[in-house]
């Protein structure tokens, strides 16, 4: 039994290391959003100011500066969690672009209904 568990653990470890190899490099264009607030109220929480339940000015920027996950919302409603260098240092590269439309080229992984894009840079499309 111990041997089986050790083999299973080793196999899971190898699969976790290989996961980036299954990522496809894509360019995704969308609006940078505060992922958690958006999921709570998709109609009102796309910009920097949110209703939580009352109005909160600068909510997305405050959350981003605390290291909360930021995401890219596409025009067709898909949400991509932003990871990698763009999300490093408490989202330092993302904070100035919250609610702006940007293009991000990076490795995209879709698993269990969730999308993630891992990238180091973004390109501004519009404010």
Image (tube, helix red, strand yellow):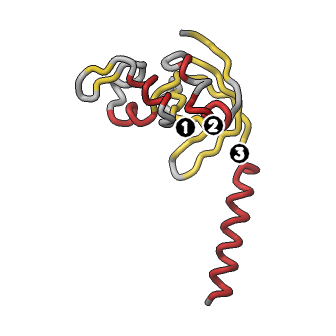
Q: CA distance from mark 2 to mark 1?
A: 6 Å
The tag earlier along the polypeptide, 2 or 1, is 1
* Residue marked by disc 3: 23
Question: Relative to residue 18, is residue 59 drawn left or right?
Answer: left
Asked if marks 2 and 1 touch (Cβ < 8 Å), the reply is yes
- The span from disc 3 to disc 1 (Cα, nearest Å) is 14 Å
**Few, some or many residues within 10 Å of mark 2 (<14, 14–19, 20+):** many
Task: Report, in whole angstroms, how far the alpha carbon at label 3 lies from the one at label 2.
Answer: 9 Å
State the image coordinates of residue 110 (x, y, percent, origin top left): 60, 46
Label 3 SS: loop
- Which residue lies most toward the bottom here? 1
Q: Residue at x 51, y 23 (%)?
A: 75
Query: In which image quadrant can residue 49 be found?
Result: top left
Query: Helix or strand or loop: what does disc 2 sit on?
Result: strand
Q: Earlier in the sequence, mark 3 or mark 2?
A: 3
Q: Nearer the viewer, residue 18 or 49?
A: 49
Circle 1 SS class: strand
Q: Which quadrant holds the N terminus?
A: bottom right
Image disc number at residue 117: 2
Q: Tell me: residue 95, above or below residue 111.
A: above
**Few, some or many residues within 10 Å of mark 1 (<14, 14–19, 20+):** many
**Furthest residue to the top?**
127
Look at the image and tell me in which quarter the C terminus lies. top right
Residue 3, compared with residue 113, is above or below; it is: below
Q: Which residue corresponds to mark 1?
A: 81
| Badge 3 or badge 1: first in the primary sequence | 3
| Residue at 34% across, 23% down | 50
- Look at 46% across and 23% down and name the residue there: 61
Nearer to the camera, 79 or 75: 79
Query: With respect to residue 109, does 99 lie above or below?
Result: above
């Amino acid at each position: 039994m111990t041997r089986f568990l050790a083999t299973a653990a080793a196999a899971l470890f190898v699969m976790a290391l290989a996961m980036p190899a299954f990522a496809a490099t894509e360019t995704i264009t969308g609006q940078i959003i505060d992922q958690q607030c958006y999921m709570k109220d998709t109609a009102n929480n796309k910009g920097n100011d949110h209703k939580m339940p009352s109005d909160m000015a600068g909510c997305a920027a405050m959350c981003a500066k605390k290291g909360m996950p930021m995401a890219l919302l596409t025009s067709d409603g898909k949400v991509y969690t932003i990871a990698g260098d763009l999300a490093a240092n408490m989202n330092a590269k993302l904070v100035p672009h919250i609610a702006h439309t940007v293009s991000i080229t990076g490795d995209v992984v879709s698993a269990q209904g969730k999308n993630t894009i891992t990238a180091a840079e973004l390109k501004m499309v519009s404010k």
